[in-house]
Image (tube, coloured by chain):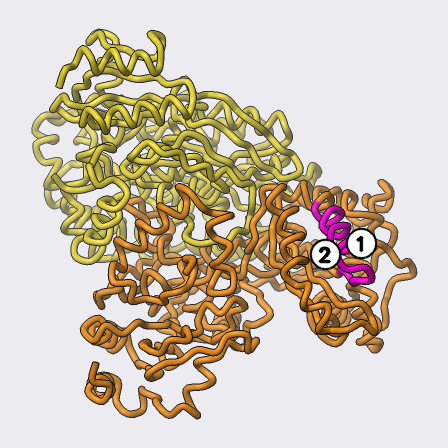
Chain colours: A orange, B yellow
Amino acid sequence: MDINSFIHDLTSIVGSQGIITSPKDTEIYNTDWRQIFQGNSIAVLRPQNTQEVSDVVKLCVQYDVTIIPQGGNTSLVGGATPLKQGNQIVLSLSRMNKIRNIDTIDSTMTVEAGVILEEAQNAAKNAGLYLPIVIASQGSAQIGGVIATNAGGNNTLRYGNAREFVLGLEVVTADGQILHNLRRLRKDNTGYALKQIFIGSEGTLGIITAAVLHLHPFPHSTEVALCAVPDLQHALRLLHLFNNYNPAALQAFEYISQKGMDLVCQHFPELNFPLETKAPVYIVVELAIPAQGDGLRELFETVLEKAFEEEIILDAVLAESETQRLNLWRFREEQSESQKLSGANIKNDVSVPISSIPEFIERATQACEAIYPGIQVAPFGHLGDGNIHFNLVQPANGDSKDFMNKSHDLMDAVCAVVYDLEGSFSAEHGIGQLKNYMMPSWRGGVELELMEKIKQSLDPKNILNPGKIFPN
Amino acid sequence: MDINSFIHDLTSIVGSQGIITSPKDTEIYNTDWRQIFQGNSIAVLRPQNTQEVSDVVKLCVQYDVTIIPQGGNTSLVGGATPLKQGNQIVLSLSRMNKIRNIDTIDSTMTVEAGVILEEAQNAAKNAGLYLPIVIASQGSAQIGGVIATNAGGNNTLRYGNAREFVLGLEVVTADGQILHNLRRLRKDNTGYALKQIFIGSEGTLGIITAAVLHLHPFPHSTEVALCAVPDLQHALRLLHLFNNYNPAALQAFEYISQKGMDLVCQHFPELNFPLETKAPVYIVVELAIPAQGDGLRELFETVLEKAFEEEIILDAVLAESETQRLNLWRFREEQSESQKLSGANIKNDVSVPISSIPEFIERATQACEAIYPGIQVAPFGHLGDGNIHFNLVQPANGDSKDFMNKSHDLMDAVCAVVYDLEGSFSAEHGIGQLKNYMMPSWRGGVELELMEKIKQSLDPKNILNPGKIFPN
């Protein structure tokens, strides 16, 4: 291949503002943000519109160069990072960042792939609407990546994953055609639901360039409580109690382990632990409805009272102000940071059936403690939808390197319990290049065979994001 | 092909109880329930379990016989009826009718494809849970068909289509393999979401044999009102008002036209029209929450009061009892029947963006009246999700045959408006063999090309439900 002529042709499509070739400037695109993966690319393309994306894809097909679609580069599994070998370009959607339309009657928003999630949330809010995908990376993550990875987050319990918000998609296919499927319809049973195939496919089947999102009414009343609970069985009873009043008011039901709470209190003493009782399990409960008024607070108090009566909770604090609400949330939000401040740590993003969570936490904790005595097991996460971040922290004052040497054994031990409980080894982070080696043992046989057939049919030359999802 | 040896081999798989060959007994399977389509089949197979389905498929591949999967045979588009040519079998899932499991903590139900929707609803209710797919055919429709067609219904507004309920699927593929994907997980981002490809594919990509459904808490409080509204713009404002109190309480928001109401009152005088005012638009509003008590009624009264103040509604009646609730619903439910009793009629199951509904109804009504003076335009349906059944009834005392001769012109006129408003020509009924001729003009180009690629990759021999979805 004549690289110069390739670069020349690319530049004639996107203009000199739309291409980056100097290694100094491409490095940030070639590295994932956790700096686990370092790849190479001929160039980083930053097209301005869908037609340019289409033309770039067609050119890459012609030159036999593979394409790594990239949004905010916030993947936790190296899903948007190029491979080591260099015959590839990064296609960044970041300049396609227009909000094309917001319709308050349809409750829809048409956005380009490069719009940052938080900007989309703010634009929705300004229109009295709510885009309820709440993830830690929302200040950088872009809509295209959010959809391509079917992102989850705190509010999945109530609103579903990213998939549930997508009414329509505009996609550039592996041969550079443009699928114009930006319909704003809630119901449309006309043949195969193509958008569903692209959502969550991590850029391996097509490049998402725009989407129509279904928004919700903005929740003007929000109430948050932190509850101390004797164990996870009681936490599930608490979930049941809230569900049986008005499940739709329940916006988040987040679990913090005793160890996780201790680490936050240690590293963020300014948060002032607000409960009188220490407990094995804490739950952050958030209720929200669009209507203003006292109705929601009354509902919350009613359910908490019942929970006290039935001895489901040991203690609880209901936020009295916006400041206190944000403060209560920080006990959950600083889980990752406090673990990072406590030394080397290992992340497991897994899910099991909700009813199996107590058994999962117990067995996985025992397994990890057996492998590495002194280990700090600090699980937390989305109890309401079965997705636990089963994180492990090195022993206090222990040796980081020695701990990390055991990381594969520890992850395998956690996964063995997940497997046994018919769970998932990647609940919301996806596969990328971090977990593709696990696909044959977890999704082998007919499942992987069908996935390969679909990949083969939509991207027969394996042009789009090679080395991701599928085992090498 | 040696038919006798084929029948012999089939019988050795399913036993003599599992196969029907006499024309007298197969006729009901070869005909759709509206009796528009009459097909032929070598035999009707009624396997008892997934392994038998798999073995039947493998045998059909070997003999080069195509397979028409069939559930309750309630398709409105001939989706489960064999074609005229005879080299096919009907595969009825009706004997696979076990509810394998209900889990009240996970809020899930694992059911076989042949379970009748209403039986699944009742089983959920007995466990304190709710399966909120509410469709007219629920007494006959089977879960497999409900999923294969991504059925909608009155509650889509709040809970989504069938797709939203499916956590896991068991599917027999076109080569007879069994995809065991009955996981009970709310979050699972491990490769392509295969279940999404089978949902809504009308049996053309695989045969659904079982599913895990996500259930909701049973709504113990339900309130229903019938509202008289000056026009559709005001109806949209009413929808907005309910959404901005607590959208999650809003379970149905159904439209009845003035003409539709008149026909029901004429044919069902015992229903006693309960409002003082006649109006151009009626809305049936249903709110529901799990909690018992007066909270919901208060919410309803608050919103209706506000709607009166803002002159959004002209009149309203809130049901005072279960009997009255069912009675109010009948004004909506008897729309089809009263139209049938009024003579020849034409059904259009379309959707447009919600904001475009007023324009759609106005333009489509004018177009139909121009084509056929005296026509009774009686649209009704799911205003809250944009899905209108734009039904047309012959003029009173007119000639049925003459009217039906114009049916294609009338349907084309309605569809032209839908197309112009970027809507769908089949919102919830699917394509089957009734609307597949429309696919090229509505979903042609890249969309149909991608659908064909997927069909080709998963069913290269076109064994499964040929002649459906795709144009002949």
The answer to whether B60 is drawn above or below residue A100 in the figure is above
Percent x, y of residue A199: 40, 58
Q: Residue at x 36, y 58 (%)?
A: A198
Percent x, y of residue A166: 41, 58
Q: Crowding at label 1, few (<14), some or many (≥20) Cα neighbours within 10 Å?
A: many
Percent x, y of residue A39: 43, 78
Residue B36 in sight in this render: no
Q: Residue at x 18, y 27 (%)?
A: B64
Q: Give how far apart the Cα atoms at labels 1 and 2 are.
A: 7 Å
Q: Is residue A302 left or right of residue B144?
A: right
What residue is pinned by disc 2?
A255
Marks 1 & 2, CB-CB < 8 Å contact: yes
Q: Amino acid at mark 1?
A: Val
Q: What span is colored magenta in the figure?
A: A360-377
Between B404 and A402, the one nearer to me in the picture:
A402
Sequence-wise, the earlier of marks 1 and 2 is 2
Residue A281 is labelled as 1
Q: Amino acid at mark 2?
A: Tyr
Q: Is residue A144 left or right of residue A350?
A: left
